[in-house]
Image (spheres, rainbow, N blue to C red):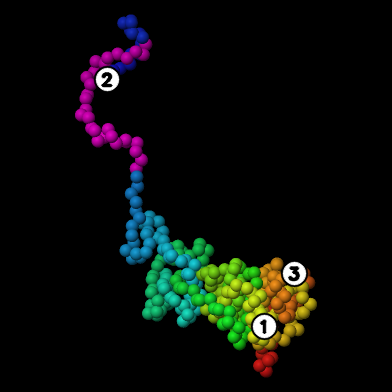
Amino acid sequence: MRDIKNNNDGNGKRKGQAVKSSKPFDKKPFDKQRFNKSEKEPFKKPSLKVKNKKYDNYETDKESTPKLHVKNPHLLLYGTHAVNAALENPDRVLKMLYVTPNRQEDYEAYSKQVKLRTVSKEEMDSLLPATSVHQGIALLSDLKEVAATQDFTASKTPIVMLDGLSDPQNIGAILRSCAAFGVHHLVMQDKGSPEITGALAKAAAGAVEAVRIHKVVNLSRALESLQAKKFMVYGADGHSETSLDTINFPVKSVIVMGAEGSGMRRLVRENCDCLFKIPMADHVESLNVSNALAITLYAVSVSARKIQG
């Protein structure tokens, strides 16, 4: 090696000029492999994703929470009431029942009619939306087929029709009210209506299995078909002069509820035989549509009891 001479020693060399070192040079053998590999190259962490032997339809990372995936997550029902009702419904095509270890014993009896899979709470959470309260149970199932218009025109119980409602929580609550008051048919327009998802079924608390949902192209034509079968059509309208408590509802009644704020659309309103309002205190402008329907269906049930004597 060479040293740097830092002073002028009078030999004509400028300060800082390199001079030959008197120390022997320690020469090492050339390492080609070390030369080609940069010591600054970052460490590459090996992939830890492996195929899980227990569940062959998903991958899991050893250092992260294992996740389950299904092709059609909107077909997943969850929560005790929604799942129990679906398991007892013969119209359901059951595919897979997921349970956490603490719920396995509760559902062991269903292993003969549906494939049962025990998963951890973390895996169950990964199957469902982040805010889902699944209670350790979820069911993968095909939805019931939507009934044709002619099916509900033969109904022997009151019918509920929704015009312009799209919120799953509202519709779930409406289904629950329908089931509570013996309504077996709910009619909605096909366009704009929500799918029957796990969130809707959870809000309905099992009523999805008790009430037949019909999606039609045109609500006005559906009302005309019902009127041809001697049904009376009653529409909720806060501006009506007719109070709910003055109506004697016949057995063959159709209750139409419009969207909150906008209410029923013009053609649907024009096809109603009677418009009514729910009597309320002056300082209250309106009710949530699911609450308004529950009050209306109670009034319908009172009329039915009077008819029966």
Q: Where is residue 249 in the image (x, y as percent from the top left)?
A: 70, 85
Is residue 18 positioned above or below 247 on the image? Answer: above
Judge the density around disc 3: few (<14), some (14-19), many (≥20) Cα neighbours within 10 Å. Answer: few
- Closest to the camera, between mark 2 and mark 3, is 3
Residue marked by disc 1: 227
13 displayed left or right of 223: left
Q: Earlier in the sequence, mark 2 or mark 1?
A: 2
- Is residue 180 in view? no
Mark 3–mark 1 Cα distance, whole angstroms, equals 31 Å
User: Which of the two residues, 101 or 167, is positioned nearer the viewer here?
Assistant: 167
- Is residue 28 in view? yes
Is residue 9 positioned above or below 131 on the image? Answer: above
- For residue 38, which quarter of the picture? top left
- Closest to the camera, between mark 2 and mark 1, is 1
Q: What residue type is labelled 2?
A: Met
Residue marked by disc 2: 1
Q: Earlier in the sequence, mark 2 or mark 3?
A: 2
Judge the density around disc 2: few (<14), some (14-19), many (≥20) Cα neighbours within 10 Å. Answer: few
Residue marked by disc 3: 285
